[in-house]
Image (cartoon, helix red, strand yellow):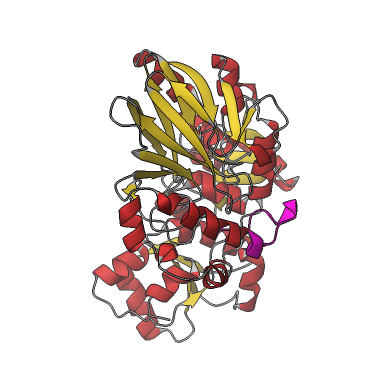
Amino acid sequence: MYFKQFYLGCLAHASYLIGSEGEAAVVDPQRDVDLYIMEASAEGLAIKYVIETHLHADFVSGHSELAARTGALIIFGEKACATFPHRAVHDGDEIRLGKVVLRFLETPGHTPESISVLVISTEVSNEARKVLTGDTLFIGDVGRPDLADARGYTSEQMAAMLYNSLHEKLLKLDDDVEVYPAHGAGSMCGRNISKETSSTIGQQRAFNYALKPMSKDEFVRMMTKDLPPAPPYFSHDAEQNREGALAIKEIARPAALAPEDAAERIRQGFMILDVRPASEFGAGHAPTALNIGLGGQFASWAGTLIPMNTSLIIMADDAVQVDEAIVRLARVGHESVKGFLKGGMDGWKRAGLPVATVEQISVERLRELLDKENDLQLLDVRRPAEYADGHAPGALNLPLNSQLGEQAARFDANSRTAVICAGGYRSSAATSILSRSGFNHVLNVEGGTTAWINAGYPVEKA
């Protein structure tokens, strides 16, 4: 049996290629599908099936393009109601790839149509030794149950289904069965996902907080309490996956814009998206630019912070970064990049257009300012659970999300405001939003809370 996990850090997304005797299946593919075709060809495999464990909400899948290019059959759980030709599977249905059997389990809870895939290598055993769990069971967590409200289910109903799927199906598997989920740490599809990308049923039974012995009522209460808001793009992407997305190559290529043309479009309401690192953005950027650096979980944050169908202009260092940004935006459904700045920031400056800056400060400098300035605001833009686990004294929690600009209205826009996250990536995005919202003097803390703790400075827990 051939088995490979592909991990896309930009989306904290895992997909899989499984093959035997010249036949293969791809599970939960990302939108740009060349890597699966190339890998299958290199291994002498023909892709016969494309399997989706559910209608993904946090990224646009490449199942339609992959099927069109390979002739593969698309497989979904029966309740997906996909609008293109596909096979709907139920509990116990199987497909064969040479000497490998893939057996499907209906495991609703994250979504109504969620399935898990048992992987059986008949050369080794007639029992499953691997299970692909989609977003039902993560490493260290389980799928959030609140993404199906628009389809007539409450979060409580979905959480009850999830409990049944976990306890009546997945936890019935042997402890040594390997677990391969569709997401890792950083995904908004869970709350406490581990950095590990695989595990075993036994390890999860022992260490996963959501699998500890408890009643169904206790589980439902726990899983529906204090859920972070789902990013607005989730519902858009789920429907795009139900209908099937365009191939990447069919998305219109944006125009190269002279700085003056870009400035005019910004005045017309286009958003300028600066994809450079925080240090470069801080040293000089176009006023009103949103900073989401390519060096972090760019796609997830672009989907979260930028409304769908926003007309975008990319600010990057070079054409390679522009192309990368276009693909990574498409992965979350953003297909409205209208242009990119010819000459980058240097061209903008040569044109004599206004330049804004964000001061970058070390944690040592932050501590000095906290000791000296009574009116310094320190905003921690990590998730509430991260903040509660330990933060710099006096820091106030303002999680980075699509409402950050509005939620920041309760703070003083005229006070000097330092922004901190875990490492300086999210905080740079937040400084750009705060500046757009009228904050006059924002500071980005380099290295974030990680650097603060490593320096031995005091930490508060809430």
- Please state, as top left, top right, bottom left or bottom right, where the C terminus lies in the image: bottom left
Quadrant the N terminus occupies:
top left
Measured along the vertical axis of the image, is residue 427 above or below residue 68? below
Span of residues in magenta: 144-157
Lateral position of residue 219 relative to residue 265, left or right: left
Query: Image point 64% across, 22% down: which residue?
Result: 250
Q: In this view, does 308 lie above or below 245?
A: below
Which quadrant holds residue 121? top left
Indicate whether 192 appears above or below 183.
below
Residue 103 visible (yes or no): yes
Q: Is residue 163 magenta?
A: no
Report whether 148 appears left or right of 373: right
Q: Which of the two residues, 461 or 179, is positioned nearer the viewer here?
A: 179
Residue 102: x %, y % from top left: 45, 30
Residue 152 percent across, percent down from the top left: 75, 55
Residue 262 visible from this viewpoint: no
Residue 79: give x, y in percent of width and height. 67, 41
The residue drawn where x is 37% and y is 85% is 372
Residue at the spot 54% in from the left edge and 48% down from the top edge:
107
Q: In which quarter of the image is residue 368?
A: bottom left
Q: Does the magenta stretch include residue 153?
A: yes
